[in-house]
Amino acid sequence: MHDAVAIRPEPPRPSLPPERPLAMPEQSLWRPAGAAAPRPERPPRTWLRRLVVFGGTALLTAGAAHEMYQVLQVQGLTPPEATVLGLFVSLFAWIAFSLVSSVVGFVAILAGPDRTLGIDTAAALPELTTRTAVLLPTYNEDPHRVMSRLQAIFESIAETGRLAHFDVFVLSDTTDPDVWIREEAAFLALLGRTGADNIYYRHRRENVARKAGNIAEWTTRFGGAYAHMLVLDADSLMTGDTVVRLAAAMERHRSAGLIQTFPVVLNGTTLFARIQQFAGRVYGPLIARGIAWWHGAESNYWGHNAIIRVEAFAGQAGLPLLKGRKPFGGHILSHDFVEAALMRRAGWGVHMAPSLGGSFEECPPSLTEYAIRDRRWCQGNLQHLGVLPARGLHWVSRLHLLTGIGSYITSPLWLVFLLVGLLIALQAQFVKPEYFPSGFSLFPQWPAQDPVRAAWVFAGTMGILVVPKLLGWIAAMARTSERRGTGGVVRSFVSVVLETFVTSLIAPIMMLLQSRAVGEILLGRDAGWQAQQRDAAHAGFGLLTRLYGWHVVLGLLLGGAAYAVSAPLLLWMTPVVVGLVLAIPTVAVTSSERVGRGLRRIGLLLIPEERDPPAVLVRAQELAAAPADPEAPALLRLAANPALLEAHLALLEDKPARRKGDVEVPLVVALARVADADTLAEAATLLTPKETFSILADRRALAEAMRTPRG
């Protein structure tokens, strides 16, 4: 153990600065408070930019709808065919919108770097006059890695010479008692390594409203001392240069309520993570530049790696409870979209700075872990159905909410589209024409389609899906650093082909996972809130079969039904059928670090940050590679280390006064178990995590537990 180095022998300084309370009233969705900010700054002719994007999307969709109608109406449009047409138009509009945004982004990238709010990365680093709080919320994360990243950010800010304008807060919502004590030890070790007097730690006993509640609680206690807050995630990494430029932009533009950066995904080791980071790095800038081009001051917030004006957040982003029961009612899970919409409703500008750089995050290591997080996001986005009709929202803010909802609704729509189309084909193959239908008719009625035109519609749809990838690759090849950083022209193109192939296999799996998630939410099943798994873990064949066996069965059924109609139909459905039938090996292979690292060795799926890593990433990796404290039961660890025990007591906030008659059941049971045990080691084995947590959160109970013989 490294406690002798990590823990100072003297009692630690106060873990928090003096409180500067700031009111954060709960906002009404139906009674807007009115404008509270000056008119936000917008790019010139924003209306024209939006007309280009939405007009282009409408023209593409109208053309595709006409062609699909011609495919289906050969002998009249039957109800199933009309259903297919409606679903096709909805799904095509979705991908057409993405294509137009990518084309706009492609042109913008070739035109030069973005200058949102006058942020110029080539200019000298500006001076600052205000104070900014850097907030790092954490929930049952690996403390060693969290503090390593935080130290790298802190040191990078210090190197700018502007550190006096920043305070750093670790805002813990951790519920695992062992992680909690490791977290405190890692925090004290961070203080010991840096000697900093402006890094603070706060642990909440109850993580009410999750991350949104965590940030809101800080705002109401300490927000009055700061002009801005930079919100991070547990896996965030940012350069000091970027942090300072964001703070300076907020100082210069008083109407700006929020500036969102475009985080680059890093540190992927599995094939799945490397696919995600390559796609995000090569294709992502097109989408980011494209949407920033027409969003203007009505952009969105992604929950992290963004700077927020505390005045705007406190005054307008107090989230209400949604009416009804979970999963639609209660605390808003996807809080970021709603917070941005409420701030914009009051007049504050919400901007994106896609060209700023120096902003990074990580990706789940496997499709399984991604699906767990995605299930929570699905519920949070569907909750926005209750926010969508709120009064006073800007129409672009409503569009953001609709986009979030649509990103999940499209999966069941795609599934229904496939199933109804297959039923039409089966009907045409096996149902005999009705030669004597009711009413007058000279000819029998049966479904019929135009196969040649259908082939062109299919090819055009596939082209719309592929063109943004090609544009992203071309844009990357146009810049020397990007070209070299992705392995050169040939290797990067092979990487694009490989990424397209793998994501084509994953897409049908995600279609079913998201369709199931939507179905569960409609049935009233809550997703809960689990800690994010950030390390690759081997999943056995049995587990994968339980999780993805139903994908394989459905794939076989779809393939068999398609083959029963004709071999050409099976060929058309091959991408979906193969993706489902190969679900288990696809998940297994994409979760492999061995495959991911092997591809990196031969120069595939590379990103520029791997060839020339930023200094903040190198420092974070260096700190994370140092030996971490071994895991140990919390109570035993405190008993073995008096300095850590003293630090824990100093960091522990006072409990609220207990009302007469209230009984904290876990604490009562925990003390009874401790009294029954002969040694503390025995007590540690008897206590549940919740009971251990209750002891750690109570000074008197902890003192009593520490009097138990260690054993």
Image (spheres, rainbow, N blue to C red):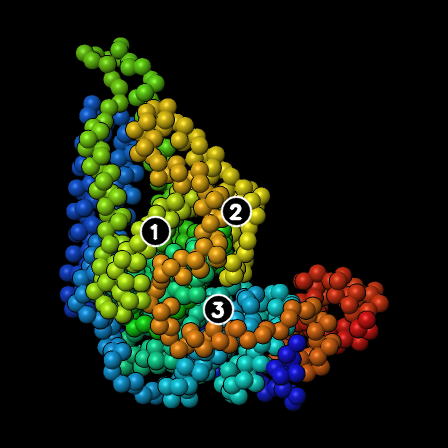
Q: Nearer the viewer, residue 601 or 513?
A: 601
Cα distance in 3D space between marks 2 and 1: 37 Å
What crowding class fits label 3: few (fewer than 14 Cα within 10 Å), some (14-19), or many (20 or more)?
A: many
Residue 234 badge: 3
Is residue 317 visible in this depiction of the protein?
no
Q: Which residue is mark 1?
A: 498
Cα distance in 3D space between marks 1 and 3: 30 Å
Contact check, label 2 and label 3, Cβ < 8 Å: no
**Secondary structure under badge 2?**
loop
Mark closer to the observer (2, 3): 3
Give the quarter of the image for residue 233. Answer: bottom left
Mark nearer the N terminus (1 vs 3): 3
Mark nearer the N terminus (2 vs 1): 1
- Measured as percent of width and height from the top left, residue 313 is found at 39, 72
Which residue is located at x 18 percent, y 65 percent? Answer: 110
- Measured as percent of width and height from the top left, residue 334 is found at 43, 59
- Measured as percent of width and height from the top left, residue 582 is found at 44, 40
Which residue is located at x 70 percent, y 73 percent? Answer: 637
Q: Nearer the viewer, residue 658 or 519?
A: 519
Type of amino acid under label 1: Leu
Type of amino acid under label 3: Ala
Q: Nearer the viewer, residue 370 or 472?
A: 472
Mark closer to the observer (2, 1): 1
What crowding class fits label 1: few (fewer than 14 Cα within 10 Å), some (14-19), or many (20 or more)?
A: some
Is 484 above or below relative to 283? below
Give the quarter of the image for residue 636. Answer: bottom right
Which residue is located at x 31 percent, y 63 percent? Answer: 486
**Secondary structure under badge 3?**
loop
Q: Which residue is mark 2?
A: 525
Mark nearer the N terminus (2 vs 3): 3
Type of amino acid under label 2: Arg
**Secondary structure under badge 1?**
helix
